[in-house]
Image (cartoon, rainbow, N blue to C red):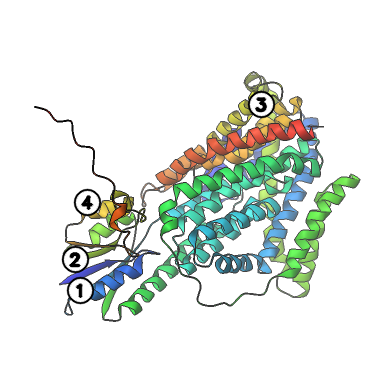
Amino acid sequence: MTVVVWIVEGTWPACVDAARRHAPQDAEVVLLHVTGHEVADAAHGAFAGLLGRGHPERDPGTRVEHLAAASAESLLQAAAERLDRPCTRVERSGRVEREVVAATEGAELLVLARDGDRATLGPHSLGPASRFVVDHAPCPLLLVWPEPAPDLTTMPPPPARPPHHG
Amino acid sequence: MLALVLVCAVVRPFNWPEAVVAVPAAALVVATGAISPGHALDEAEQLGPVIGFLAAVLVLAQLCDDEGLFQACGAWMARTAAGRPRRLLAQVFLAASAITAVLSLDATVVLLTPVVFATAARLGARPKPHVYACTHLSNTASLLLPVSNLTNLLAFAASGLSFTRFAALMALPWLAAIAVEYVVFRRFFATDLDAGAQAPHTADAPELPLFALVTVGCTLAGFVLTSAVGIDPAWAALAGAAVLAVRALLRRSTSPKALLRSVSVPFLAFVLALGIVVRAVVDNGLDTALGHLIPDGTGLTALLGLAALAAVLANVINNLPAVLVLLPLAAGSGPGAVLAVLLGVNIGPNLTYAGSLATLLWRRIVQAHDAEVELGEFTRLGLYAVPASLLAAVAALWASLAVIGGG
């Protein structure tokens, strides 16, 4: 059995803890991190917008790419230490939500965290990326709250009763 | 000819420096009589001090980086953010606004952006809001001083304002535009900023580069002093750069070759050549073509119209040629009109991530085979931030002109 744990900056400890608790002892745990292109591209673009500066070796986007690779590695390292059992680390880059779905192929469980507005229970607790993954994942999901979940009183009130006909 | 120079500057065939095409183009327009040698000389005389000023600021920023100013800035941000992404965003806004204003937008884009990314990564915070803040502020926060942006230096030379009056008139628009950006960022990235982060484990604060800070402070004071006694403030920038350069050379932390590289001579040649080519285009009919598009006067609507026109032009070509085209046309209406053009060309480029459609299109073409450039989010952010901050900045400029006067 393969359990994929999606590691995202800020919310990953809850996912690792959930994997420790719920993944069977004999399961193969895969720690997955995906680096999006858009941050380095923004830095590339800002430099390209500086007309006439030349010196492509000064492009901050390239430095950001190297830093991103180093940071992903240390994030996975920290996650592996917290998990404290044998695991595989996988680093991918591209469109984050699509890469995550692609990485779950053949897996029997994906652990991920809510990444939206976490003050109230409800659909906004899923951001665009995790919404996409929840909607498209081909495997069962374990969706955790990164912090203790908000209490039930935050649930939106039920919709008004439809007018009674008949 | 202008189109050719711009295309080559964006495309950079064979990785040539931009000046390789721009300088012969400038020579050609003079040789063919498209611009009279007198006008070309005028333009060169006007651009000369601007270019010297620019060179001094580029060196100053590079030497501050060598002294570890930006590393110290990153450590300060990490420490004071205390693991809270919203506070980190506020620190990034403070640092990027100050660095852009004093050491120019090049410093923020090239030197600060990687430091901000590394800082966010060290805290385990999502880097996107903070890096995007750097790229936005490198434009928006470049309104304050003539040294903040090359466009400002060009306008400063044309406006006839003193350094201090320029800064006084632009202070309110600068604050207004940054405040609007901050509100937009807090709302736009609410989810990413909620995601939490860890406080840094190690408290290893690198030594504060006091010497560099004091030199920059003295340079700023020098700007005020030189403009008060009527000397070109470029000398103050030159003095600041010279102090740091001599110290770095004595300590052998830099070489004359590295210094020369940070002066970026091809870039300076490119600016000069571009100025001459643009002047030729303006002399040969662009002024009458654009002349009736330019609103007269310095009322609020005229200023808004000018800023909007400048923003559009900056987005189509690039803000450097845009400001060169619009300056001679706006200068007739007084400093208020020139500053309104600056608001447009400085804030406008945030609409597209590469500063202009021309650059954007080219980047699309070269990257078509690679992963597609995926910055719909950046453009959406620009659509929220640019019109709002432009409007706020123009209103603030109008108020400043009413209180201080354009003199």
Q: Which residue is mark 2?
A: A109
On screen, residue A38 versus residue A97, left or right, reads right
Name which of mark 4 and mark 1 comes first in the sequence. Answer: 1
Q: Are marks 4 and 1 in contact (CB under 8 Å)?
A: no
Which type of secondary structure does the marked residue at label 3 adopt? helix
Mark 1 touching mark 2, by CB under 8 A?
yes
| Residue B33 appearing in the image | no
Residue highlighted by disc 1 = A23
Residue B103 in sight: yes
Q: Chain of mark 1?
A: A
Mark 2 residue type? Leu
Q: What residue would you read off at disc 3?
A: B300
10 Å neighbourhood of mark 1: few (<14), some, or many (≥20)? Answer: some
* Tag of residue A135: 4
Q: Nearer the viewer, residue B395 or B365?
A: B395
In the image, residue A17 sits, relative to residue B37, either above or below, namely below
Q: Secondary structure at mark 2?
A: strand
Work out whether disc 3 and disc 1 sit on a shared chain: no
Are marks 1 and 2 in one subunit? yes
Residue B2 pos. (x, y %):
61, 33
Q: Quadrant of residue A86?
A: bottom left
Q: Residue at x 39, y 71 (%)?
A: A75
Identify the element where label 1 is drawn. Answer: loop
Residue type at numbered disc 4: Asp
